[in-house]
Amino acid sequence: MVVDTKIAGIAVGDAHPVRIMGVINLGSESFYKGSVTEPENVIATAKRMVAEGADLLDVGARSTWPLADKITKEEERRRLIPALELLVDNVDVPISVDTQFADLARETLELGAHIINDVSGLTTDPAMVEVISEFGCPVVVMASKNIPGDPLGMDAVMRSLGGIIRRSEDEGISPDKIIIDPAIGKWLPEKAPMYDFESLDQLERLKVFQKPVLVAISRKSFIGEVLDKTANERLMGSIAATAVAVYKGAHIIRTHDVADTADAIRVVKAIMGRNVSAKYSGYSIEALDVINPEDAPGYFVGIGATVTGARVMKDKTVFRVLRINNVTTTEALIIKQEALSRGCDAALPRDAVSHETENTDLIVMGTELQLKRLALKLEGQARDLPIISGLIISTLQRFRDTNYRYG
């Protein structure tokens, strides 16, 4: 499950440095006016970013900010093509083009662009898949369903990206050319900051897709919501969010602030431990990072298990440890007995086992499936055990309750 690939000649993956994608923004409608590059400054900006540590450059001429004034495709082309003609002859790093239109993508690839970054996840222009497949170029696909960035919550992001990947590969895009983007940002009015908080906090869930992960968080609105600051004042917030993204597994960071981002990434990578694995004589074992049972079927199907079997097994993949407080000693002993009979375990104080105390705390542990079965059994018991049953179910549900955890 280790990601290890090459994107336009650059090694990208778990064992490689986190790559920095510097943003060359040609769209004057952008939410962050300080990022807009005037045509006469394109080369200077690009060379500065490369000197500061950018491994790739992403050139865009249309602001995807939902509140931005809309421009025509002809205006996008008028801004984009001259800038690209300058860049391909003057910088020595791969160039990504941020566009949703197949004819523009084709023209830029013919001019020498290396990567297409489509924030619509190949949904705006159906012909985009054909262009990507024809040129065999890497493509960044952002989680999208009907419009760019519309999935709300990490479960929706996972479903969206899973569908985009399947369609792309079925229609001829090479699996090793796909880079995934979880769509951080306020892409539609109802997308509250909590959805971005959840996506960043659970970014490791994307590992199931075995694709390079690109995260674009630079100065975005969820940072402004936390800090109550304008885009011009969000640098430190961006750095903090970048640190989380890298720690959670991002392979590429798209940013307006290359030098500061590079420093942050170096510190995070120094702190991070390696993925746990072992190899010997043709054999290997690696630890899988499953934090949500809904992701587990992807791992099972990936080794050839049936879809039905994968669904049956998913609740066995996540282990929980729960502390239950202030129950009677009799209730604690019943919980322990029922837990053991369902494959769980429970830890009690010695004086509770010997009935030397009236009330006690205990710790129960097991897979989500085992704990759900324990709760079902306790629901029909005497005393206050039905209350404990309900609390166990509520606790398990809250692991996946976006509003509870991040709202």
Image (tube, rainbow, N blue to C red):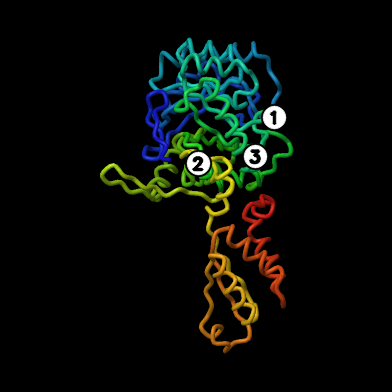
Q: In the figure, 346 relative to 163: above or below?
A: below
Measure the C-alpha gap from mark 2 to mark 1: 42 Å
Q: Position of residue 141 (x, y in %)?
A: 56, 28
Residue carrying label 1 = 66
Q: In the figure, 146 relative to 349: above or below?
A: above
Query: Label 3 amino acid?
Result: Ala
Which residue occupies 41% across, 40% down?
2
Residue carrying label 2 = 305
Say whether disc 1 or disc 3 marks the residue closer to the N-terminus: 1
Q: How many residues crowd mark 3 within 10 Å: few (<14), some (14–19), many (20+)?
A: some
Residue carrying label 3 = 156
Say whether disc 2 or disc 3 marks the residue closer to the N-terminus: 3
Residue nearer the viewer, 338 or 195? 338
Q: Position of residue 34 (x, y in %)?
A: 58, 30
Measure the C-alpha gap from mark 1 to mark 3: 20 Å
Contact between marks 2 and 1 (CB within 8 A): the answer is no
Q: Position of residue 394 (x, y in %)?
A: 68, 61
Q: In the figure, 376 relative to 292: above or below?
A: below
